[in-house]
Amino acid sequence: MTRVTGYSIVVPAFNEESGLPSVLEELVRTCPDAEIVVVNDGSTDGTERVARDFPVTVVSHQVNRGYGAALKTGIAQAKHDFVVFFDADGQHDPTRIRGMLHALEGADLVIGERSS
């Protein structure tokens, strides 16, 4: 059985200057023991500046390389074996992360699904 002792949250972000502050505020508050990695994927707005205002690791692509490339960069940067992907647009609830990590204790992979 797998026990999650440390985890990284990868947040790919492209032109998310307006929504990113509330997402990062919630992640930092809800997941204080997580390493949070924001991948600024070539944004042309203030996404990188906003991310640097938080206690997170920021990695920036010089040009937009796409969602998949941002995830790969985040995985490569992550310090922990367990990685959570979390979108920067506020569509996910960070309070659900803890339950997903708990579910990993009996599984190899956990995928969250939004419901209406």
Image: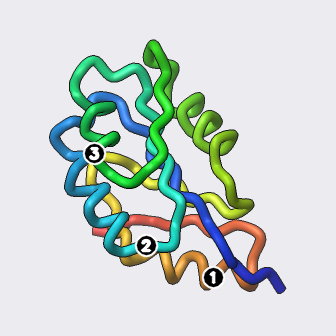
Of the numbered discs 3 and 1, the one sitting upstream in the chain is: 3
Q: Are marks 3 and 1 in contact (CB under 8 Å)?
A: no
Would residue 38 appear left or right of 47 to someone viewing this image? right
- Decide: few, some or many residues near mark 3? Use Cα within 10 Å; few <14, some 14-19, many ≥20: few
2 or 3: tag closer to the N-terminus: 2
Quarter of the figure with the C terminus: bottom left
Q: What residue is drawn where x is 65% and y is 44%?
A: 75
**Number of the label disc, if any, that sits on residue 68:** none
What amino acid is found at the position of numbered circle 3 in the picture? Asp
Residue at label 2? 32
Residue 63: x and y, percent? 45, 13
Q: Residues within 10 Å of mark 1 (few under 14, many from 20)?
A: some
Q: Does dot 2 land on a helix, a strand or a loop?
A: loop
Q: Dot 2: few (<14), some (14–19), or many (≥20) neighbours within 10 Å?
A: few
Q: Is residue 70 left or right of residue 106?
A: left
Choose between 105 and 111: the one closer to the eye: 105
Mark-to-mark CA distance, 3 and 1: 32 Å
Left/right placement of residue 8 relative to residue 23 reads right
Q: Residue at x 44, y 54 (%)?
A: 86
Cα–Cα gap, marks 1 and 2: 19 Å
Q: Residue 103, which numbered label?
A: 1
Q: Which residue is mark 3?
A: 53
Rendered position, 81 above or below 30: above
